[in-house]
Image (tube, rainbow, N blue to C red):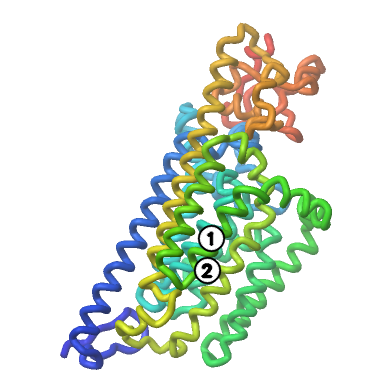
Amino acid sequence: MRALSFGFGPTISAGVLSASAESAYRTAARHEKQFAVIAIAALALAGGLACAWDLALIWDGGAQFCYTLYHGIGYGYGARFFTEILWQPVVWAASWTKDLAVLRFLYGLPFCLAPAIAAALSWWMVARTRPELFPWALLGICAASLPVEVFAINESIFQLNMFWPLFLGLLVPLNRARWMALGILAIFQFSHPQGLLLLSGAAVVLWLQRTEPRLRPRAWIVSSAALICFGRVLLFPDVEAAQQANAQVVFALFRQSVLGWPLVGWMCILAAVFTRSTRLAMLFLALAAAAWGWWAVDPWRWSKALDARRFVVLFAAPFFLGAWGSLPKWDGFSIRRRSIADYKAAPQSLSNLMPRASAVALIFAGTLLLQAHGWSGLMDRVLAQVEADPRSVVPTEDFAWLQGSPADHWGLGSQVIAKLGGRKLVLDAAGRAALDRHPPLVKLGYDAWVTPEPGILGWFDFREAIGQ
């Protein structure tokens, strides 16, 4: 009999299983890959369309885009450095193109595609060794981010998504290429204080795997990384996170961003994942799709979704536990052939969990597309009103119809700049008053004021808009 290898560990003879078991194994493995490809493709398609619809400009995204182009450096909030890395291509491209649509697309692409990239990396990490871990990563990426993925450029969402391939990679045998990928992914865990919680949790999981001594060095490495992250939090405290770290504020944020349809939809997904009945799982998935669709189709329903970013780790916790619980099915790092019995043994086996996780990925993609389309419609109406107004400076008070929508935000003026290049402005009372100063200042964001002259890269020229 010829030998089969999973790419890591010992090669195992095909003769150890019957022909029927081997056929079942091959069929199940093929189905696993098909489901994974469908899920990743759906996430990539939804992310690409959301990026084309300029979803990355939502809330304070427009201000960060304008700041990046004006100052010639990726915007970074405090010690959160990861945007300075991911927006460097925008800075490079700004020197050879004046097409704002291209720059906006480059700006949003790494964030809108983050779920697809994280899912693809997670599959790459475990496909040959422990593929039963992948559905948990897919669920952790999609179900945990669903309430807030529309706030695409948020650091905590991106960090959680990129943590999943890192987490899975720590639990499986790795070759050199995968070790290099883990090193790159680990960098992003030091950008946001949330990384301390994620790294500490991974360290605990590694230490608790007592039956596998070869995980001990990894446990020491991750524990050291968590300690470094703790030092980063002490030396470079996050002011915004600290201000909101009290029970009253947390409850208020939870109530306005999670209670209601997002919580209902998330609980339906949870029930679908953990129920033993396939029929019940299908029912809960249908209910989840209905709840998320109803919530996502109207922008006024999800206008406070950005506040759910505080709870992404909480939403991901059941799926981290599910991945951890699946580890005892394997004999340490030795790689054995899976038999048909492995696929029928438990409701969380790949034969049941993989289709459910893929269905959740499709729900995620549909929800994001509905939200991105709704956002695009709002901005089209705003721009039509701005273009129809004969004034070059339009007061924000003229957009009272946006009240309660995602565009009812201080970032509206910067979103218009990001679309029109600064030839017309939408400003609040403080922004209009700043134009009368000597020298005049233009408001890019609530804490970003610039002169009318173009910045270091030639963006943006406001002199015509303010009559200079």
Q: Looking at the picture, does residue 314 appear above or below residue 216?
A: above
Which residue in the protein does label 2 denote?
Answer: 166
- Mark 2 neighbour class, 10 Å CA radius: few under 14, some 14 to 19, many 20 or more: many
Q: Quadrant of the N terminus?
A: bottom left
Left or right of residue 150: residue 465: right
Whole-angstrom CA distance, mark 2 to mark 1, is 7 Å
Q: Looking at the picture, does residue 354 appear above or below residue 345?
A: above
Q: Looking at the picture, does residue 349 appear above or below residue 114?
A: below
- Residue visible at 28% across and 82% down? 5
Q: Quadrant of residue 159?
A: bottom right
Residue closest to the eye, 96 or 32: 32
What x and y, as percent, mark residue 284? Answer: 48, 59
Q: Secondary structure at mark 2?
A: helix
Query: Which circle marks residue 162 in the picture?
Result: 1
Q: Secondary structure at mark 1?
A: helix
Kind of residue at badge 1: Met
Residue closest to the eye, 41 or 86: 41
- Residue visible at 57% across and 28% down? 418
* Name of the residue lying farthest toward the top: 390
2 and 1 marks in contact (CB < 8 Å) = yes
Would you say residue 175 is visible in this rendering? no
Residue closest to the eye, 230 or 324: 324
Kind of residue at badge 2: Leu
- Residue visible at 39% across and 46% down? 45
Q: Quadrant of the C terminus?
A: top right
Would you say residue 458 is visible in this rendering? yes
What x and y, as percent, mark residue 292? Answer: 53, 47
What x and y, as percent, mark residue 431? Answer: 76, 22
What x and y, as percent, mark residue 35? Answer: 34, 62
Q: Quadrant of residue 352?
A: bottom left
- Residue visible at 46% across and 51% down? 363
* Name of the residue lying farthest toward the left: 1
